Image (cartoon, rainbow, N blue to C red):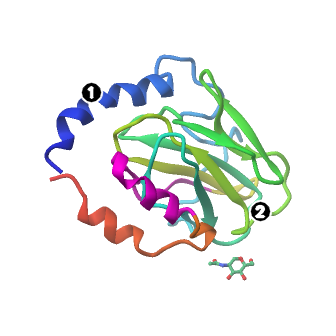
């Protein structure tokens, strides 16, 4: 683990470059709040969990993401690193009833709903990691109705795989949407000191 740190500082730069931190925020990309004047997020813990098909990522290798919980109508989903507000990486093939949302200069920086049809845990989002050495995580805002939504729904961290871990990352991608409860254990194990 220690050997990673010098590289981590250097590659941190790539994360920010890919996320265009100086670009103008487009709409809700940064605060991820619906633009409903006067409607506050639900204060209760979100009944949603963001699951990923892998606990490590490799630049360019798709990661699938599902939102597990009651069916929902609205969604905003982004990948992030550290405490940053920039949307990282690019999404591909928005599933039915969703579309891309441009964040800063990244036309595929986020995915959001394209209508109010119900979406459920069979809705699978696919994300392409950038060349980022830092851990990344997914953030979502999920709405059941216009006035009922939760913000700051966060996945566990995914760590950057070493080059030799390629097979692990690819192998894990066959696990798909069912979600592996292994994830929290892995993250605790690798928490920073
Ligand atoms: C996925 O959604 C279906 C239909 O809403 C539900 O029956 C099932 O229990 C859900 N699975 C999980 C893992 O939440």
Residue for point 54% across, 71% down: 179
- Expressed as whole percent of the image width and height from the top left, the position of residue 50 reads 54, 62
Along the viewing direction, whichever of 110 and 144 lies nearer the viewer: 110
Q: Which residues are magenta?
A: 150-173
The Cα atoms of the two marked residues, 2 and 1, are separated by 39 Å
The disc placed on residue 103 is: none
Q: Is residue 128 visible?
A: yes
Is 104 left or right of 97, judged from the image as shown? Answer: left
Residue 118, relative to residue 84: is it above or below? below
**Label 1: element kind:** helix
Per the image, the residue denoted by label 1 is 10
Q: Earlier in the sequence, mark 2 or mark 1?
A: 1
Q: Quadrant location of residue 119?
A: bottom right
- Expressed as whole percent of the image width and height from the top left, the position of residue 187 reads 32, 62
Q: Quadrant location of residue 134?
A: top left
Residue for point 18% across, 33% down: 6
Along the viewing direction, whichever of 157 and 11 lies nearer the viewer: 11
Q: Is residue 138 magenta?
A: no
Residue for point 32% across, 30% down: 11
Residue 4, relative to residue 24: is it above or below? below
Q: Residues within 10 Å of mark 1 (few under 14, many from 20)?
A: few
Quarter of the displayed picture in which ligand 1 can be seen:
bottom right
Q: Residues within 10 Å of mark 2 (few under 14, many from 20)?
A: many
Does mark 2 have its CB less than 8 Å from ligand 1?
no
Residue 40, relative to residue 189: is it above or below? above
Per the image, the residue denoted by label 2 is 119
- Expressed as whole percent of the image width and height from the top left, the position of residue 15 reads 41, 31
């Amino acid at each position: 683990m220690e050997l990673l740190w010098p590289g981590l500082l250097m590659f941190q730069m790539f994360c920010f470059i890919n996320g265009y931190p100086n670009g103008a925020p487009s709409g809700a990309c940064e605060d991820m709040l619906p633009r409903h004047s006067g409607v506050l997020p639900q204060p209760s813990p979100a009944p949603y969990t963001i699951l990923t098909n892998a606990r490590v990522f490799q630049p360019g290798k798709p990661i699938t993401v599902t939102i597990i919980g009651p069916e929902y109508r609205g969604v905003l989903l982004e990948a992030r690193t550290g405490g940053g507000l920039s949307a990282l990486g690019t999404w591909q093939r928005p599933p039915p009833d969703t579309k891309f949302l441009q964040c800063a200069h990244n036309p595929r920086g986020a995915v959001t709903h394209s209508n109010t049809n119900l979406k459920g845990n069979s809705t699978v989002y696919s994300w392409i990691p950038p060349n980022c050495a830092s851990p990344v995580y997914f953030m979502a805002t999920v709405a059941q109705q216009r006035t009922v939504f939760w913000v700051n729904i966060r996945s566990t961290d995914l760590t950057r795989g070493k080059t030799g871990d390629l097979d692990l990352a690819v192998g894990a991608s066959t696990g798909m949407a069912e979600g592996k409860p292994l994830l929290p254990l892995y993250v605790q194990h690798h928490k920073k000191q």
